[in-house]
Image (cartoon, rainbow, N blue to C red):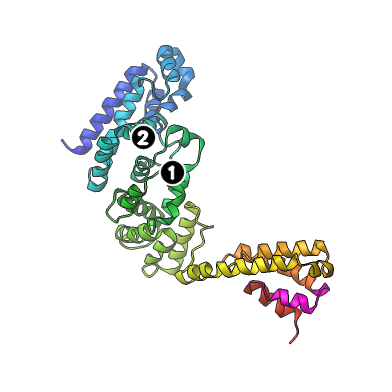
């Protein structure tokens, strides 16, 4: 008998036990719908059918409604936990690294493993938004209990960060150190870790969906090869590996689909040189800003420039100095601020103001000299 047939028999067996427990034999098409929803979306889906079940199994429904974590598990929860674990085993059967990871978690962190298993059986993907191997690995790696999962956005933030950034460094995960140990994180950054394998599978599957309808030869090979690059560099940089293989229109369409699906439109991608320049110039910016603010507090300047204008100049400086020349939205804001600065400059054109202008960051300084000092 094949594995597929075994899986079918197991699933049918659990489905039948659920039907018997809820006495759904005579519920017609609703029987199939209820069982399917429970197997896919978890035990809490049961309460959407409360009106129907109240007539069939009032005691069973009352038992399920009063259950909370820490109490003895209900028969339905036990059945759904068995179903979820069977699915996990089938999913990792051909992925030895993830299979080894699950087995290790089950033995070394059995309580946490059981909590995650129960949570998936109870809520399905309500809070994790995915039933993929990546979601399973992340839930087992993170020390997140039910309360945090329901009331905070930690898992969602981790999910977005991992999917967007890949595993190019541990830096993006610094803010999640409350939920994962440094040793575990370092282990998972390795190219053969369970998280790396799960990410590759996830990226390959998602990219395959995006290019499914495109006229690209050997889509599966393309998706698999790109998955390695995306895993180590994130979507924005990793997807560039397929640019030479597809047409310009196809690449643009793929980029747009990825950006929209994974909400990457606001992710700023800087080259190594830009990152270095931004880092090294931050001290200069702080020095210039401090000098400018100190100068504005000088008694002589306060006599020359009215206090309202002085405060506005300080505000303009604080806003304008944040622009590093890469963000278009910030550029438009900075441009408007520069115009306001120029209008003030025309009223206080003096040697003093000229000297103060030298402390401005380069983008504002160029605008200032271009429009205020004729050649």
Number of other residues with Cα within 10 Å of mark 1, as a class: few under 14, some 14 to 19, many 20 or more: few
Nearest to the eye among marks 1 and 2: give it: 1
Is residue 220 left or right of 233 when viewed as pictured? left
Circle 2 sits on which residue? 116
User: Is residue 333 in view?
Assistant: no
Residue extent of the magenta highlight:
346-361
Quarter holding residue 70 = top left
Q: Write down the residue under mark 1.
A: 178
- Seen as rendered, the residue at the extreme front is 299
How many numbered marks have been drawn onto this rendered protein structure? Answer: 2
List x then y, in percent, for residue 362.
63, 74
219 on left or right of 266: left
* Pointer 1 or 2: first along the chain: 2
Residue 60 is marked as none
- Taking the magenta stretch, the answer to whether it contains residue 31 is no
Relative to 348, residue 222 above or below: above
Q: Which of 150 and 123 lies nearest the eye of the viewer?
A: 150
Image quarter (top left, top right, bottom left or bottom right) of the N terminus: top left
> Is residue 350 part of the magenta span, yes or no?
yes
Identify the image quadrant of residue 17. top left
Above or below: residue 11 compared with residue 152: above
Label 2 crowd (10 A; few <14 / some 14-19 / many >=20): many
Question: Is residue 208 at all visible to an observer of this figure?
Answer: yes
Query: Are the two marked residues, 1 and 2, in contact with CB atoms closer than 8 angstroms?
Result: no
Helix, strand, or loop for circle 1? loop
Q: Residue at x 50, y 41 (%)?
A: 153
Percent x, y of residue 158: 44, 47
Q: Nearer the viewer, residue 122 or 17?
A: 122
* Location of residue 238 (image quadrant): bottom left
User: Cα distance, mark 1 to mark 2?
Assistant: 18 Å
Percent position of residue 217, x then y: 32, 63
């Amino acid at each position: 008998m094949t594995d597929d047939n075994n899986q079918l028999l197991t699933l049918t067996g659990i489905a039948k036990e659920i039907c018997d427990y809820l006495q759904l034999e005579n519920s017609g098409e609703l029987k199939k719908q209820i069982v399917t929803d429970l197997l896919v979306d978890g035990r809490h889906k049961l309460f959407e059918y409360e009106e129907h079940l109240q007539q069939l199994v009032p005691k069973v429904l009352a038992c399920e409604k009063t259950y909370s974590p820490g109490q003895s598990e209900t028969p339905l929860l036990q059945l759904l936990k068995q179903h979820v674990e069977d699915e996990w085993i089938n999913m990792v059967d051909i992925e030895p690294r993830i299979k080894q990871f699950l087995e290790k978690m089950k033995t070394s962190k059995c309580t946490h493993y059981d909590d995650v298993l129960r949570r998936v059986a109870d809520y399905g993907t309500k809070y994790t938004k995915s039933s993929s191997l990546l979601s399973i690995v992340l839930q087992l790696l993170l020390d997140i209990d039910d309360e945090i999962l329901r009331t905070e956005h930690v898992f969602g933030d981790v999910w977005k960060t991992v999917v967007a950034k890949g595993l190019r460094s541990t830096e993006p995960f610094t803010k999640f150190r409350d939920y994962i140990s440094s040793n575990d994180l370092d282990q998972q950054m390795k190219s053969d870790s369970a998280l790396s394998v799960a990410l590759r599978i996830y990226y390959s599957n998602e990219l395959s969906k995006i290019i499914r309808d495109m006229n690209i030869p050997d889509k599966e090979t393309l998706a698999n090869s790109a998955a390695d690059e995306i895993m180590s560099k994130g979507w924005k940089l990793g997807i560039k590996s397929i640019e030479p293989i597809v047409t310009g229109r196809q690449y643009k369409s793929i980029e747009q689909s990825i950006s929209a699906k994974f909400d990457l439109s606001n992710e700023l991608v800087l080259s190594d040189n830009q990152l270095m320049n931004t880092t090294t110039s931050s001290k200069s910016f702080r020095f210039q800003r401090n000098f400018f603010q100190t100068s504005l507090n000088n008694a002589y300047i306060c006599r020359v420039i009215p206090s309202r204008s002085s405060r506005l100049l300080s505000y303009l400086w604080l806003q304008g100095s944040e622009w590093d020349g890469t963000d278009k939205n910030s550029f438009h804001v900075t441009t408007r601020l520069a115009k306001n600065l120029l209008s003030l400059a025309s009223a206080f054109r003096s040697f003093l103001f000229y000297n103060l202008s030298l402390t401005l960051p380069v983008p504002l300084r160029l605008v200032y000299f271009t429009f205020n000092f004729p050649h």
